[in-house]
């Protein structure tokens, strides 16, 4: 097993727990040390029990870079930085990469990374989204929601705006707003559509709408809807298809002009709906689970170290 030092904020109470789940999975397949605070890397290494073979840093979860690790360019241990929303913190991140001579950039998205950081294409490793299949799964719930949308409605998501405007008077359509990116306590997790409550709500729906934002990101909802055995209606694009998502096999491709007709067809044709729903469900669980992505990450780190 490799000795992996993962420097990251604590996301165990955050809206999106994927990196908390990833930590737990990495602890099963590496000699993992987790460190939370800012500081000098030489001081951090002196404090921990195992000298790392690789250092992996996550510091772009909030509105500023944190934790801040200094002195990375002065050590001979390979270092990687996880990159989430590439459109945020662009120049701060660029300065951090350059100053610390970071060799590997594990980006959640590919094409937008290439566009924003063309000088770092050779350093980029694609680390797409994934789902914890202990949370995002088929709960076997009664499908009592015809049409469902959950998430932000703003100018970043023009198709969502159009869909919610069309269905606003339709009792078969349910919308839950975005709860905000922050920490949540246990009581809030019971009331708000996050975590398992969010997953179970998707599992109750026959059809789930989303869109990839103006940035054409393969956002987590593409993975989550399929994993919870709902029929996803959403646009397609090359980066998504390069992840293996096949339109009209794993999900139904829509645009601003045809979402109404597509939704009506699949609501009224149970066999067609259930066929694609099942294919999408199997696809995600077999290709984009937490366990699979964590192992892919470790395989890549082992390749780098060899």
Image: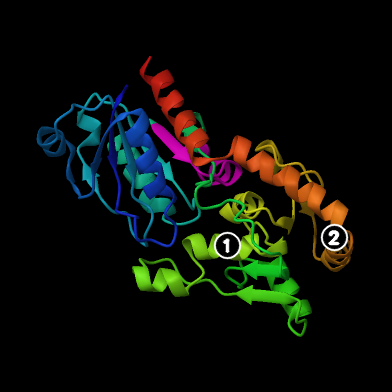
Q: Which residue is mark 2?
A: 266
- Circle 2 Cα neighbour tier, 10 Å, few/some/many (<14 / 14–19 / ≥20): some
The quadrant in which the N terminus is found is top left
Q: Residue at x 53, y 38 (%)?
A: 118
Q: Which residue is mark 1?
A: 200
SS label for mark 2: helix
Please tell me in which quadrant of the rendered image residue 264 appears. bottom right
| Front: mark 2 or 1 | 1
Q: Residue at x 74, y 73 (%)?
A: 162
Give the magenta range.
Answer: 104-118
Q: Residue at x 18, y 37 (%)?
A: 41
Q: Is residue 35 left or right of residue 109?
A: left
When the figure is inspected, residue 271 is found, relative to residue 260, above or below; the finding is: above
Q: Nearer the viewer, residue 110 or 142?
A: 142
Q: Is residue 199 magenta?
A: no
Protein image colouring: rainbow
Please tell me in which quadrant of the rendered image residue 280 appears. top right
Q: Position of residue 114 (x, y in %)?
A: 56, 40
Instruction: Answer whether residue 123 is visible to the viewer in this image.
Output: no
SS label for mark 1: helix
When the figure is inspected, residue 8 is found, relative to residue 179, above or below; the finding is: above
Q: Position of residue 240 (x, y in %)?
A: 67, 44
Q: Position of residue 60 (x, y in %)?
A: 38, 53
Q: Nearer the viewer, residue 155 or 265?
A: 265
Please tell me in which quadrant of the rendered image residue 54 appears. top left
What residue occupies the far top of the structure in this picture? Answer: 306
């Amino acid at each position: 097993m490799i000795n992996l030092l993962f420097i990251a904020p604590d996301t165990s109470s955050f809206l999106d727990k994927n990196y908390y789940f990833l930590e737990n999975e990495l602890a099963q397949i590496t000699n993992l040390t987790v460190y939370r605070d800012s500081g000098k890397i030489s001081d951090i290494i002196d404090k921990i029990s195992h000298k790392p073979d690789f250092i992996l840093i996550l510091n772009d979860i909030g509105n500023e870079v944190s934790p801040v690790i200094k002195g990375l360019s002065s050590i001979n241990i390979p270092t990687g930085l996880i990159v989430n929303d590439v459109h945020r913190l662009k120049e701060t991140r660029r300065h951090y990469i350059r100053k610390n001579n970071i060799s590997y950039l594990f980006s959640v998205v590919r094409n937008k990374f290439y566009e924003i950081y063309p000088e770092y294409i050779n350093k980029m490793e694609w680390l797409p989204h994934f789902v914890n299949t202990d949370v995002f799964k088929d709960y076997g719930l009664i499908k009592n929601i015809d049409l469902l949308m959950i998430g932000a409605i703003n100018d970043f998501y023009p198709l969502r705006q159009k869909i919610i405007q069309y269905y606003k008077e339709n009792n078969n359509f349910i919308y839950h707003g975005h709860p905000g990116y922050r920490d949540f306590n246990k009581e809030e997790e019971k009331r708000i559509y996050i975590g398992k409550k969010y997953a179970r709500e998707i599992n109750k729906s026959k059809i789930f709408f989303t869109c990839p934002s103006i940035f054409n990101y393969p956002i987590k909802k593409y993975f989550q809807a399929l994993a919870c055995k709902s029929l996803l209606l959403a646009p397609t694009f090359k980066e998504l298809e390069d992840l293996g998502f096949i339109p009209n096999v794993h999900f139904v491709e829509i645009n601003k002009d045809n979402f109404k007709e597509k939704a009506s067809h699949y609501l009224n044709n149970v066999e067609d709906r259930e066929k694609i729903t099942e294919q999408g469900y199997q696809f995600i669980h077999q290709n984009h689970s937490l366990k699979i992505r964590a192992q892919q990450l470790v395989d890549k780190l082992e390749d780098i170290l060899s």
